[in-house]
Every structure is written in structure tokens, then in C-alpha cells.
Image: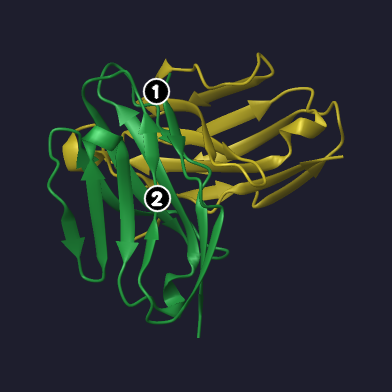
Chain colours: A green, B yellow
Amino acid sequence: AQKVTQAQTEISVVEKEDVTLDCVYETRDTTYYLFWYKQPPSGELVFLIRRNSFDEQNEISGRYSWNFQKSTSSFNFTITASQVVDSAVYFCALRPTSGTYKYIFGTGTRLKVLA
Amino acid sequence: GAGVSQSPSNKVTEKGKDVELRCDPISGHTALYWYRQSLGQGLEFLIYFQGNSAPDKSGLPSDRFSAERTGGSVSTLTIQRTQQEDSAVYLCASSLDLQGARETQYFGPGTRLLVL
């Protein structure tokens, strides 16, 4: 079975704090892709990152960083020095590489960054 | 350039009626996806198209749901004999194709469906 779990339903932080959003996945596929998307309030989902299961290097993009650990089936997302504009719902997703482009999304984590 | 557009933005219907939801992908995008987002839930995959064909329809919840795509562009998601549990936001996304970074999905604003 394929599954993505985002156990944190909602997180509130004060501006400039660091925050980590957890994502744990289950798949029997040996190769797969992992994604993060951001859905701002009253806005459209925006792609943030795509990671191949072969590549376990962590990635940093500005204040955003992602920690992929195959051993624990986790793909966590950290925002450093959070800002009010980071307030959104963040979704983690999984797509196996075998035969289909069916994405499995988690239920999302609502992040509120308070000024 | 224009993004993915969906119409209507909101739809209220009575139980038992049929509804059609429309998605206009970004011009030149060959892949198109439909998702359903219920309150407090993640995105639920419904179907995707490569060109006009739908290789994976496994996410359609029942035979009341169908989708088509014509001319490799516009797609319509049809729900027949709507039920209250069909109430949700229906999201459409498109991608350039299904290769590498070109698989990046661009989402539309969604159609909010309420079945009374």
C-alpha cells in the first residue's frame, strides 16, 4: 500500500522561529518520487520540491531545506527564520515510478506564522 | 502567461443532479490531473490524462464519476446523480509532460462543489 502521513495537523510559530514539518511515507516500490507543495490561504497549490528516491542528499533553497531519510521513510521540511508569508497548508506527496503517475498526498499541515 | 483555469469556481446543486466541471490546462501541457480535496483531507487522486487518453482511472470513486479530454486540451469531469458526499473542492493540474522536471504540476484554483 502507498501512504503519506503528515501527523502534524496544525503548527503555530512566532515569526523568525524555525519550524519543521514532518512527512512519513509507505511504499513497496523501490523507486519513487517525493514532493512538497504549498497551498497559501485562498490560493492555489504551488510546487516546492521533487526528490528521487535514489538521491538522499539534503537540499537547501534559501530559507527552505529538506531532509530525506530513506531508512526512516521520512522527507521532512524545515523553514528557517519563518515569516508571516510562510503561513499556508503544506502537503507532502509520493509517486511511485512504476507504471503510473498517480500521486499520493498527505492530509497536509497548516502552518501559522504569527507576527 | 495564463495558468490553469477551472470553471465554475463554485457550484451548488441538488442531490441527484448531474454536474460538469471544466479544466483548461496551460497551453502546451500534455498531462492533466484531477484531484478531490475534502474538508480536512489531503488531495485524493481521481484520474490523469496523457494527451487524450487516461492510463489510470483507479481513483474515480464510483461509476458516477467520469472524465474526458478532447483535443489534448480541455478536460471535463462529470459527476452523475450527485450525492452529498461528493461535496468537495475539485482541483485540476497540468504538467508539460511526464518526463523528469517537466512533470511539475501546476494547479488551478479549483471548483468548490456543494451538493444539497
Is residue B39 at least partly visible in the picture?
yes
The amino acid type, in three-letter code, at marker 2 is: Asp
> Which picture quadrant has residue A35?
top left
Image location (x, y in percent) of residue B86: 72, 32
The chain under label 1 reads: B
Q: Amino acid at mark 1?
A: Asn
The residue tagged 1 is: B52
The relative height of residue B40 versus residue B100 in the rendered view (above or below) is below
Q: Nearer the viewer, residue B97 or A49?
A: A49
Where residue A88 sits: x, y (%)? 49, 64
Q: Nearer the viewer, residue B108 or B25?
A: B108
Left or right position of B19 against A32:
right
In this picture, residue B116 sits left or right of residue A34: right
Residue ranking furthest to the front: A72
Are there few (<14), some (14-19), or many (20+) residues within 10 Å of tag 2? some
**Above or below — where is B87 with respect to A21?**
above
Q: Is residue B24 visible?
A: no
* Mark 2 belongs to chain: A
Residue B78 shown left or right of residue B17 in the figure? left
Secondary structure of residue under mark 2 = loop
| Relative image position of residue B44 (x, y in whole percent) | 54, 33
- In this view of the protein, which residue sits in the foreground, B60 or A36? A36
- Of all residues, the one furthest to the top in this rendering is B63
**Identity of the residue drawn at 33% across and 30% down:** A95
Count of numbered marks: 2
The disc placed on residue B81 is: none
- Distance between the alpha carbons at the discs numbered 2 and 1: 37 Å
Residue A17 image position (x, y, % from top left): 38, 77
Q: Residue at x 82, y 29 (%)?
A: B17
Of labels 2 and 1, the one closer to you: 2
User: Where is mark 2, residue-wise?
Assistant: A22
Quadrant location of residue A85?
Answer: bottom left
